[in-house]
Image: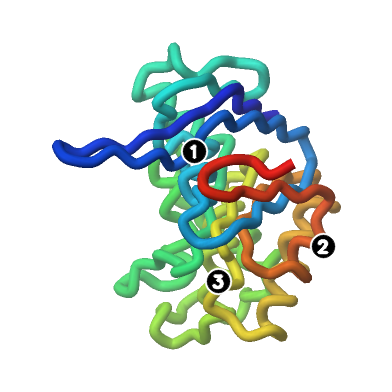
């Protein structure tokens, strides 16, 4: 589903150049659950941002469904992100002034869709993560684990083919971490959703199909 071919990422300022990724070659199959591990600063989040088309490589190419993305316009890139990719972050990124169901609807606001259809999809997504009883609550009224469930519902509401999860259990205790991972595993198995998950937790990585390790921006084979 996703191919990164000889990808390199360099961040430059007027006085310093930082090599974040070098010679990355990763092919992610459709329906695969892949984990990425490595110490802090090894390039894991940069890799996820490039996979999710939030950042561009300095060198190398990216293909999604066999289609090179370098030739896409900004509008086409945004449409591809919105329709094919869902994002889950460690710190949730919920909007505190919106209710749970309104937070989940946010990605659908960029699609031509009736209000009733948006609400229906949002409620279905919340049901999948076990939060049907919390639709009218605000993020400040939820636990960390519940907030992460809302973030997952928001990621899947548009029925993306791929979810990119950056340390989705990093702020949670072990019991809640297991619950969140159970949800991701279920999405992968039941709906064939492709998932790439960055994690520091070896036990979490052991439950995925394949593990990629990074060190100082390079793949460790």
> Which residue appears at 85% of the width and 52% of the height?
189
The Cα atoms of the two marked residues, 1 and 2, are separated by: 24 Å
Q: Do the residues labelled 1 and 2 touch (CB within 8 Å)?
A: no
Residue 49 lies, in percent from the top left, at 47, 43
Any mark on residue 21, and which?
A: 1
* Secondary structure of residue under mark 2: loop
Crowd rating for badge 3 (residues with CA inside 10 Å; few <14, some 14–19, many 20+): many
Front in this rendered view, residue 16 or 75: 16
Sequence-first tag of 1 and 3: 1
Residue 104 lies, in percent from the top left, at 49, 60
Residue 208's place in the image compared with 60, above or below, is below
Q: Is the C terminus in the top left, top right, bottom left or bottom right quadrant?
A: top right
* Secondary structure of residue under mark 1: strand
Front in this rendered view, residue 57 or 52: 57
> Which residue appears at 43% of the width and 29% of the height?
57
Crowd rating for badge 1 (residues with CA inside 10 Å; few <14, some 14–19, many 20+): many
The Cα atoms of the two marked residues, 3 and 2, are separated by: 21 Å
Would residue 82 be visible to someone looking at this image? no
Crowd rating for badge 2 (residues with CA inside 10 Å; few <14, some 14–19, many 20+): few
Any mark on residue 148, and which?
A: 3
Please state if 150 lies on the left or on the right of 10 as rendered: right
> Which residue appears at 70% of the width and 29% of the height?
1
- Which residue, given by chain and number where applicable, does mark 2 sit on? 206
> Which residue appears at 79% of the width and 60% of the height?
185
Quadrant in the picture for residue 206: bottom right
């Amino acid at each position: 589903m996703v191919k990164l071919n000889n990808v390199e990422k360099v961040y430059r300022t007027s006085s310093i150049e930082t090599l974040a990724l070098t010679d990355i070659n990763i092919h992610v199959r459709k329906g695969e659950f892949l984990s990425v591990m490595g110490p802090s600063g090894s390039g894991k989040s940069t890799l996820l941002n490039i996979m999710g088309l939030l950042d561009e490589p300095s060198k190398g190419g990216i293909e999604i469904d066999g289609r090179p993305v370098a030739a896409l316009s900004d509008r086409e890139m945004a449409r591809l992100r919105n329709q094919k990719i869902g994002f889950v972050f460690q710190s949730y990124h919920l909007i505190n002034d919106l209710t749970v169901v309104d937070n989940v609807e946010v990605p659908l606001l960029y699609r031509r869709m009736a209000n009733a259809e948006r609400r229906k999809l949002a409620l279905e997504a919340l049901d999948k993560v076990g939060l049907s009883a919390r639709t009218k609550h605000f993020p400040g009224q939820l636990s960390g684990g519940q907030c992460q469930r809302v973030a997952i519902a928001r990621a899947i509401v548009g029925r993306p083919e791929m979810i990119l999860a950056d340390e989705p259990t990093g702020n949670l205790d072990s019991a809640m971490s297991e619950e969140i991972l159970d949800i991701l595993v279920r999405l992968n198995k039941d709906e064939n959703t492709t998932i790439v998950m960055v994690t520091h937790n070896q036990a979490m990585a052991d439950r995925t199909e394949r593990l990629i390790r990074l060190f100082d921006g390079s793949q460790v084979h």
